[in-house]
Amino acid sequence: MASATLLLLLSFPFLAISGHSSSLQNYIVHVRRPNNLFKSDNTRLQRYYLSFLPASPTISSSSRLLYSYREAITGFAAQLTAEEAISMSSKPGFLRAYPTPTYKLTTTHTPTFLGLRSNTGLWHHSNQGEGIIIGMLDTGIASNHPSFADVGIPSAPPHWKSPCQLPPSAPCNNKLIGARSFVGKNASDFHGHGSHTASTAGGNFVGNANVVGQANGTASGIAPRSHVAIYKVCDLEGCSGADITAGFDFAIQDGIDVASLSLGGGSASFATDPIAIAGFRAFQKGITVVCAAGNDGPYSGSLSNEAPWLITVGASTLNRILKAVVRLGNGEVFVGEALFQPRKFSSRQQFQLIAPNSCDKHPAASLKGKIVLCESVANIPAIKAAGGVAVILKNNKIVGATIVLDLQSMPSSSVTFEDGAKISAYAGSAINPTASIEFCGTVISNNSSPSAPMVAYFSSRGPSLSSAGILKPDIIAPGVNVLAAWPRPISKDSNHNGESRREAEFNIISGTSMATPHISGVVALLKKAHPNWSPAAIKSSIMTTADMVDDRGKPIMDEKLKPADYFALGAGHVNPQKAIDPGLVYNISGDDYIRYICGVGYSDDDATIIAGREVSCARVGQIAEAELNYPSILVAMNGTKMTVNRKVTNVGEAGSRYKVEVESPKGVKVKVKPQKLKFREVEEEKSFSVTFKRIDGATELRRWAQGSLRWVSAKRVVRSPIVVTLKV
Ligand SMILES: *[C@@H]1O[C@H](CO)[C@@H](O)[C@H](O)[C@H]1NC(C)=O
Ligand SMILES: *[C@@H]1O[C@H](CO)[C@@H](O)[C@H](O)[C@H]1NC(C)=O
Ligand SMILES: *[C@@H]1O[C@H](CO)[C@@H](O)[C@H](O)[C@H]1NC(C)=O
Ligand SMILES: *[C@@H]1O[C@H](CO)[C@@H](O)[C@H](O)[C@H]1NC(C)=O
Ligand SMILES: *[C@@H]1O[C@H](CO)[C@@H](O)[C@H](O)[C@H]1NC(C)=O
């Protein structure tokens, strides 16, 4: 997102040409907090905000005012022209105005994959998140869905009093304890995204869940006994920053414990990004804010939601595959996948295999009775019309090994880039190429082929552009082919009839949107188990206990089938069972974050906008990015030697002892002081320093290198990823 000034300047050419006053746009306006806080007086607060609005003969000030915010930001949203926004800046108390940014949606087997089972481990200790409130800022909710039934859920906490903008036929209950809509008066989900994410985070148990017969099992959210509160801030087109801020504003006042945002708008300055600003205010109220990393991978520097006080979630695959095996006439076998698994298809029959020049137009050749090899973007109806019996959909090089499933209206098998290339080579060289597709249904495997988890191609990658000294994403979680609630049947195609048992109710979709609520659910479990932990402590425990290896015990791979780097993985793949008992946490206070904001070079006004109170950086001091007490370490080497400091809090037993183990990044020598930590008491804090020294003449460290630092006790490993870059 460009800065406010830039956006304002860009609208001037239009003004000059049109000659009239420019058109009204929705702006977010930040102002200084009035001295007398207007604590509980909404009318006075609104009057203060209205005083910034221009007097106009045609539009009344109150009809321009879209929202007057109390908690999420100090300021309001209003309709203004570009000139009005500029002239407003001379009013005392004004800080900044910019057109409201828009965000995109970053579109149950999963709990088992994450090691969650009834009455054991985390689900037992956290009582499945009972009593914790997860706030979903999304497209609303299909409140009649069985995932949101309140069987076995206690009533909402006494302080809770959010309204319920749901149809009377499916009103709020003990599971869905509130529903506010900021896009229309109806919090019903007309999209599907919001129901999917909400059921992933906090959905109740639903037996026999499946999509066209596949992925059958008991679906449940990660925190099935939690409460869910709905803030509908997005519609089919996307989400406006003003509506997101309003959702946050009420969510903070309502008293949620976790905020889950499966949406993103690309890299942005923290001081003009409502998610970063409202997210900081929520952090200060003890709310953990979980956000999607974005679907702009695999390109580097493609992250959304980079602020360090947010948990930024990337996406990876599950070990569940919907197997559709391709066998070629030459005997080669490839494991592909398909959502639609027709039972009547002749699995063993070899059909002629054809690879047309293009699959996106009406095919020239007759495809009658043939299996058609296509790029994954193919015109399926045209192929069907031309008589094709099935398609093999091959990934392109960018998508690589990530198989993202869509419901196709004809038999198909989606294969990886590598496998697709081999099938192409065969189709192009054999005299009479043939193939068969065998549909094998849903297979859950450990030691699986392909291995899992694997980073999805679309998962946005670091480095963070708005804060290059903080390693992002923080964590990865399942986000490929995730089954969860859906408001309506996903298929009206007669081909799919009879395959599904409950087709009205579930869908399998992919995105960092799907990964995000997995982490929100885990946060709810941790919050229940450790009610007094700060959001920073909760994040630390998720990060330092994450897995770095897949189900084969090998480093987690990316879509290129190469070990994923830390700009894709962050701290690794979430391991909820371990996160509940991290041993040590890297804690960070709100004040630390303000000093960090000053340290990154934001102005006093920026820091004031984010903090919601007057900040003078000269007075509060600064923390360099590398010195923020983050659970991961990213250092930009300046010269040949550099030292960073960290502080850990003992959240294990009194008397715990830890010894450091370091995996040094290539070309760098890492020294930790002290090497051992002994904690006499619980809650005790200990500091240590990490010194990085470039090895003389080492050529390995060209751009960046990665390693790790682990505090190891008899029972636990507290791991921080390390990335060293060269300052240019
Ligand atoms: C909201 O939408 C649902 C689903 O379409 C509908 O049943 C309900 O009547 C709507 N409610 C209002 C107040 O418009
Ligand atoms: C799904 O599983 C349940 C029990 O686990 C079984 O009764 C049901 O027939 C299965 N449905 C399908 C479509 O396989
Ligand atoms: C994986 O399979 C092995 C044996 O095949 C078994 O011992 C192990 O417990 C399995 N792991 C998981 C996570 O299911
Ligand atoms: C972390 O710091 C906060 C204050 O910023 C404090 O309330 C909390 O107790 C600390 N420890 C943990 C484990 O959260
Ligand atoms: C980088 O090095 C310069 C001079 O060598 C020093 O003034 C500066 O403080 C260093 N910056 C960091 C972040 O260490």
Image (cartoon, rainbow, N blue to C red):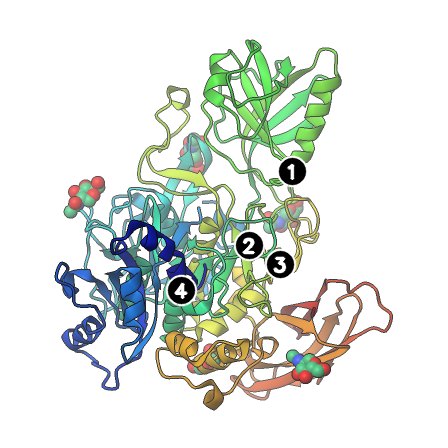
Q: Amino acid at mark 3?
A: Phe
Q: Residue at x 23, y 64 (%)?
A: 67
Q: Which residue is mark 4?
A: 4
Vertical order, 441 against 58 (above or below):
above
Residue 168, visible in the rendered structure? no
The CA span between labels 4 and 3 is 29 Å
Q: Residue at x 30, y 66 (%)?
A: 85
Say few, some or many: other residues with alpha carbon within 10 Å of mark 2 (under 14 / 14 to 19 / 20 or more): many
Q: Amino acid at mark 1?
A: Lys
Quarter of image, ligand 2: top left
User: Which element carries disc 2, helix, strand or loop?
Assistant: loop
Q: Position of residue 677 (x, y in %)?
A: 66, 84
Quadrant housing residue 419: top right
Q: Which residue is mark 1?
A: 397
Vertical order, 212 against 41 (above or below):
above
Q: Which comes sooner in the sequence, label 4 or label 3? A: 4
Q: Which comes sooner in the sequence, label 4 or label 1? A: 4
Whether the residue carrying mark 2 lies under 8 Å from ligand 5 is answered with no
User: Which element carries disc 4, helix, strand or loop?
Assistant: helix
Q: Do labels 4 and 1 touch, CB within 8 Å?
A: no
Q: Amino acid at mark 4?
A: Ala
Say few, some or many: other residues with alpha carbon within 10 Å of mark 1 (under 14 / 14 to 19 / 20 or more): some
Left or right, residue 166 beside residue 727: left
User: Which element carries disc 1, helix, strand or loop?
Assistant: loop
Q: Nearer the viewer, mark 2 or mark 3?
A: 2
Q: Which residue is mark 2?
A: 302
Left or right, residue 33 beside residue 699: left
Say few, some or many: other residues with alpha carbon within 10 Å of mark 3 (under 14 / 14 to 19 / 20 or more): many
Q: Which comes sooner in the sequence, label 1 or label 3? A: 1
Q: Which residue is mark 3?
A: 567
Q: Amino acid at mark 2?
A: Ser
